[in-house]
Image (cartoon, grey):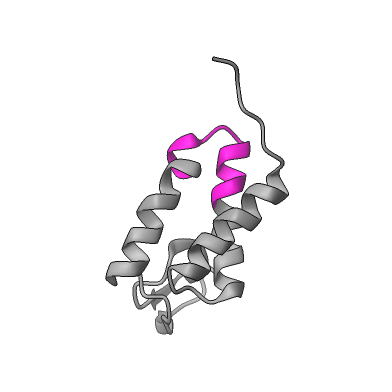
Amino acid sequence: MGAIRVAAEKTKKLFSQIFVSSGLKESDALTVADNLAQAEIRGIRSHGLVQVANYSTFMRNGKINCNAESRTLSESDSALAIDADFAPGSVAGL
C-alpha cells in the first residue's frame, strides 16, 4: 500500500480537536498537536501520530492534567526545576 499524505495543518487541526474533546484547553491542545505533527513531519513517528490515542486516553483518565498549573521549584544561573503538575510535556516546557 502506498503512503497516505495529509496536509500538516489539517493534521494539527484534527489532533487539536481530539485533545480539546479530551479536556485540554484549546491553546494547550494546539501546542500539543503542533508538537506531535512536527515529530511526524521530521520522521520521528514514535513521538507523532501514534501518540494521539495515548495522550487522549491519558487526558481522559487523569494521567495528564488538563488544567495543570506549573510552578518553579528552584532556579539558578544554569538550571530551572519545575513541578509541571502532570501537564503534557510540550505544554510544561513553555
Position above or below: 72 against 86: below
Residue 38 visible in the picture: yes
Position above or below: 24 against 10: below
Viewer-proximal residue among 72 and 76: 72
Viewer-proximal residue among 35 and 56: 56
Residue 63 visible in the picture: no
Viewer-proximal residue among 80 and 76: 80
**What is the x, y in percent for residue 78?**
49, 69
From which residue to which does the magenta span run? 36-48
Tell me: 8 left or right of 3: right
Tell me: 51 left or right of 2: left
- The answer to whether residue 38 is magenta is yes
For image coordinates 43% across by 38% down, the residue present is: 46
Question: Residue 27 lies in what quarter of the image?
Answer: bottom right
Tell me: 58 left or right of 7: left
**What is the x, y in percent for residue 31?**
59, 64
**What is the x, y in percent for residue 34?**
62, 55
For image coordinates 56% across by 43% down, the residue present is: 39
Question: Residue 62 lies in what quarter of the image?
Answer: bottom left
Position above or below: 6 against 61: above
